[in-house]
Image: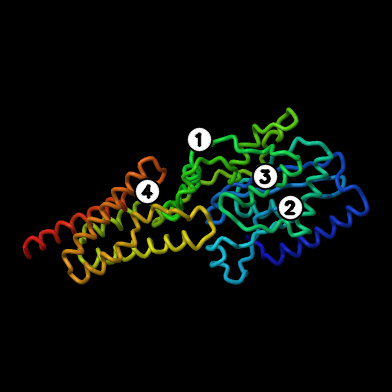
Amino acid sequence: MNISLLKKIALSLILLATVHTTIAQTPILSENARVSVITCGTGNESYSLFGHTAIRISDPNQFIDLVYNYGAFDFNTPNFVAKFTKGDLQYFAVVHPYTDFINEYTYERRSVYEQELNISDTLKQRLFENLTTSLASGESHYTYKFIDKNCTSMVVDIINKTLGTTAIVKNTDTDITYRTILYPYFDGHFYEKLGTSIIFGKKVDELGTKIFLPLELQKSLRTVQFNNQLLAKENKILLEYNEPTPSSWWNNFYTYGLLLGFVLLMNTKIINQMYFLIMGILGVFFLFIGFYSSHHELAYNYNVLLFNPALLVLLYFYYKDNNKWTYNLSLFNLLCLAVYLLILINKAHLLIVLPLIITSGLILVKLALKNKKKISIII
């Protein structure tokens, strides 16, 4: 968030008080009111890589033009990192004037699109009341989940609740996995792509049948029917920027390849030991986070076959020059790599982790052959 959380909360409270006063005195929305889904384009920061979704309520007769945003969180939450990792960090909605909202995205040079909902005045009123009630009662607070509960899914839920039916459903890209859906969002962000590839487990390999990203909702709204007509009118451009794909001297495949190439070319005991140490520690972390976290995306992470905690055991015997166990554990880790490669044959992240598989495989084969030879000499 580019403006302070306290400012947003204070503004939300002021606007809510204004809305409650308006409810008590006059009808909230006139016949000229419009309600729409706002889709914000992607940004270059990690929190903005996937875009954003919001709801706009506009009524020129009542001088109302508000944007409801379900993606707010408090960086000052005690144990913020631990709560986010655990999966019990609380997100909530805020409401602010449309002018403030659009100015923020103008400053960030991020595209903004609007899809007006083609619903009756009664349903517009109901949606506005549901949004107001949600903020006033605390219903807008939710535990963030990457796929199952986020700013986009919350917008879908409250609109479906207003319509009294599950009108908005995923109807595009349902034949590809969540992992495949995510990959284009990482263009120009290589290490973010690599990081999510190795920390996400089995869940993201399921078919992407849920709406969880803003642009997915935008695409689905183009075809969703309600009362025998399109639910959303034609997409309207509020802001549009054709920003070039970001580039970085270090955040790219070349530095990744150079680093792994350096490990292979050096082929020294200390370099190999450092490599095993890093890979093994990451494996322990993946195992721990898979059990500790409530994020289902992190569970059942078969990438531990590559980032194998057994490498730490191998490292111990390698350091101790124990030829027999170094040989046996090298073979065990090679077997794990073979199984891992079979699992990855039809997965979206095969190519990005293939250099790591090759690097680990070559080091382990050399180590196994070297120690097998020493064992033979001893015998």
For mark 3, what is the residue? 156
Q: Residues within 10 Å of mark 4 (few under 14, many from 20)?
A: some
Q: Secondary structure at mark 3?
A: helix
Q: Where's residue 78, x and y in %?
A: 60, 71
Q: Nearer the viewer, mark 2 or mark 1?
A: 1
User: What's under tag 1, amino acid-wise?
Assistant: Asp
Depth check: give the residue in front, 374 or 260.
Answer: 374
Q: Residue at x 50, y 44 (%)?
A: 178
Amino acid type, mark 4: Ile
Q: Earlier in the sequence, mark 3 or mark 1?
A: 3
Residue type marked 2: Thr
Give the foreground label among 2 and 3: 3
Residue 13: image x %, image y %? 78, 62
- Say whether residue 163 is left or right of residue 368: right
Task: Give residue 99's mark.
Answer: 2
Q: Earlier in the sequence, mark 1 or mark 4?
A: 1
Between the C-alphas of marks 1 and 4, the distance is 22 Å
Dot label at residue 175: 1
Mark 2 or 1 closer to N-term? 2
Mark nearer the N terminus (2 vs 4):
2
Disc 3 residue crowd, few under 14, some 14–19, many 20+, Cα 10 Å: many
